[in-house]
Image: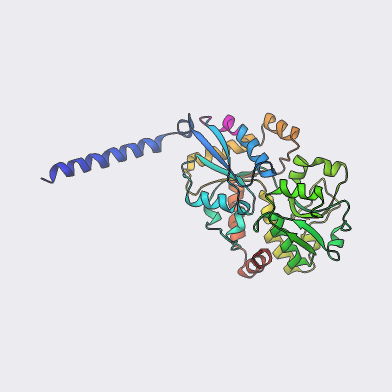
């Protein structure tokens, strides 16, 4: 009486194996044709990450095999950690979900950031749209005009959540270099802190992407409404040749090593990634689409029209190598860097 059941089980296994074989033989173009690809965005609407992600989403369908529909979806929270956690544990790993967020996604787990529940080395890194340079700035009416002033005079700055660069970076500079930022957290992203600055609620912003200023607030630079105090990066931006970087402010080799670990993430400032385990051929298709887009005249023309920097884009392979390198830092340096950016204390 068990033979019919055994026969049905054998047929079910054979059918499953057959379907699996068909799925595995499906090309990326065949897989993506007619599908929707969701593009998660780590920050609220209106800010720099949202604008970059939507620009990328508008053009991706032209370059990705199968030309799927690409649908942006904001998933803000904890400076990308909410999105990254969802990527790691909840989103499908078939290549139909990707996301854009800050480079800090690559180090949040390494530094033990609150709420980070993933290993960044396992993500499917696709590419970064630019080597973003963060800056600390003050409003033109503030007595703090330079990095040297930051060492002597308190600057009240607005920030978003506890893991956002607008809070983490000035906290780190206070602890490592002795700057005098007074941080007021709780604003809903860069758009809200920008408005607070213009209203006079705060006197500066401790960490904001320079590309976001170029895209969203070019009048700040044109009308000299802000003072750019320090560059939160390893190298100077070509438009800011006279503003020092954080590593240039280091007084010891130890400070320099810690600052380099904290701010290395800036080289992948607009990180595009997928969940762990995207099939190799689909990940290759996504990476190829990214690489082609970064050289496309129509894409670059729209970015230029919107005053959005596409500066030193990084391939997915390069991003994966950088994350692996960061995870190989010595425990002592990682411990000191983690303590410097810990906003819970």
Name the side, left or right, on which 67 lies relative to 53: left
Q: Is residue 232 above or below residue 295?
A: below
| Residue for point 66% across, 56% down | 161
Res 230 visible: no
Q: Position of residue 272 (x, y in %)?
A: 60, 44
| Residue for point 39% across, 37% down | 23
Identify the colour scheme used.
rainbow
Q: Position of residue 88 (x, y in %)?
A: 50, 51
Give the tally of numbered discs. Answer: 0
Q: Is residue 66 magenta?
A: yes
Name the side, left or right, on which 285 lies relative to 166: left
Q: Position of residue 205 (x, y in %)?
A: 77, 54
Res 335 visible: yes
Name the side, left or right, on which 310 lies relative to 221: left
Q: Nearer the viewer, residue 18 or 45?
A: 45
Name the side, left or right, on which 118 lies relative to 143: left
Which part of the image, by quadrant, shows the C terminus? bottom right
User: What is the span of residues highlighted in magenta in the rendered image?
Assistant: 60-67
């Amino acid at each position: 009486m068990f033979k019919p059941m055994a026969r049905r089980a054998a047929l079910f296994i054979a059918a499953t194996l057959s379907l699996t074989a068909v799925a595995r033989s499906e090309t990326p173009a065949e897989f993506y044709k007619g599908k929707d690809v969701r593009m998660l965005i780590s920050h609220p609407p209106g800010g720099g990450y949202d604008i970059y992600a939507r620009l990328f989403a508008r053009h991706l369908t032209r370059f990705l095999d199968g030309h799927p529909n690409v649908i942006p979806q904001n998933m803000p929270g904890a400076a990308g950690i909410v999105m990254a956690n969802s990527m790691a544990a909840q989103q499908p790993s078939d290549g139909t979900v990707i996301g854009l967020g800050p480079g800090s996604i690559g180090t949040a787990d390494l530094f033990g950031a609150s709420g980070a529940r993933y290993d960044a080395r396992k993500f499917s890194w696709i590419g970064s749209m630019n080597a973003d340079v963060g800056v600390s700035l003050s409003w033109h009416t503030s007595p703090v005009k330079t990095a040297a002033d930051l060492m002597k005079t308190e600057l009240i700055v607005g920030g978003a959540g506890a893991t956002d660069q607008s809070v983490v970076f000035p906290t780190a500079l206070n602890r490592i270099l002795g700057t005098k930022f007074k941080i007021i957290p709780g604003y809903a992203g860069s758009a809200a802190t920008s408005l607070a600055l213009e209203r006079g609620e705060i006197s500066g912003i401790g960490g904001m992407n320079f590309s976001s200023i170029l895209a969203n607030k070019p009048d700040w630079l044109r009308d000299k409404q802000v003072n750019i105090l320090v560059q939160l990066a390893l190298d100077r931006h070509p438009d800011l040749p006279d503003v020092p970087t954080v590593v240039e402010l280091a007084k010891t080799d130890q400070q320099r090593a810690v600052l380099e670990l904290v701010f290395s993430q800036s080289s992948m400032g607009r990180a595009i990634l997928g969940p762990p385990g995207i099939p190799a051929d689909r990940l290759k298709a996504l990476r190829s689409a990214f690489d082609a887009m970064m050289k496309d005249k129509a894409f670059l023309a729209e970015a230029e029209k919107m005053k959005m920097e596409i500066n030193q884009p990084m391939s997915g392979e390069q991003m994966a190598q950088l994350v692996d390198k960061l995870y190989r830092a010595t425990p002592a340096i990682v411990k000191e860097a983690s303590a410097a950016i810990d906003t819970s204390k």
